[in-house]
Amino acid sequence: MSPADHENPRRPVIQLTGRPGIGKTTVIRRSADLLAGRSIAGFCTGEIRVAGQRRGFRVTAFSGATDIRNRVRSPCSS
């Protein structure tokens, strides 16, 4: 997909927002599966939790690339 594709005003854009745990990520992932074979771009994020606390976010692009953002590292013990 070229940068020009992202600037096409006729290209649909989908953005989901809402409270945690209502299925936003599930909807996006299933939609991407249904659109397999089509040219889609975008990403979804998921929380990284340790002992019930948010420690960062995992970003997964539909291209398959992944990254970690805003990771909070535990202090080193001495």
Image: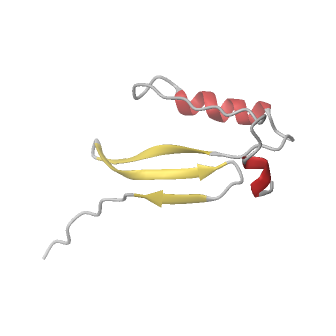
Give the number of marks: 0
Q: Nearer the viewer, residue 72 or 38?
A: 38
Q: Is residue 3 left or right of residue 48?
A: right
Left or right for 33, reference 15? right
Give percent across and percent down for residue 16.
54, 29
Residue 27 image position (x, y, % from top left): 61, 27
Residue at position x 63%, y 32% from top?
Answer: 28
Q: Quadrant of residue 15?
A: top right
Q: Position of residue 35 (x, y in %)?
A: 80, 34
Which quadrant: the N terminus? Answer: bottom right
Which residue is situated farthest in the top direction here?
A: 22
User: Quarter of the image holding residue 29?
Assistant: top right
Q: How is the image coloured?
A: secondary structure
Residue located at (74% from left, 38% from top): 9
Foreground of the two, 38 or 64:
38
Q: Is residue 10 left or right of residue 58?
A: right
Q: Residue at x 78, y 53 (%)?
A: 4
**Residue found farthest to the right:** 37
- In the rendered image, the vertical position of residue 31 relative to residue 38, given as above or below: above
Q: Residue placed farthest to the bottom in the image?
A: 78
Residue 24's x, y, as percent? 53, 28
Which quadrant of the rendered structure holds the C terminus? bottom left
Residue at 68 percent of width and 54 percent of height: 64
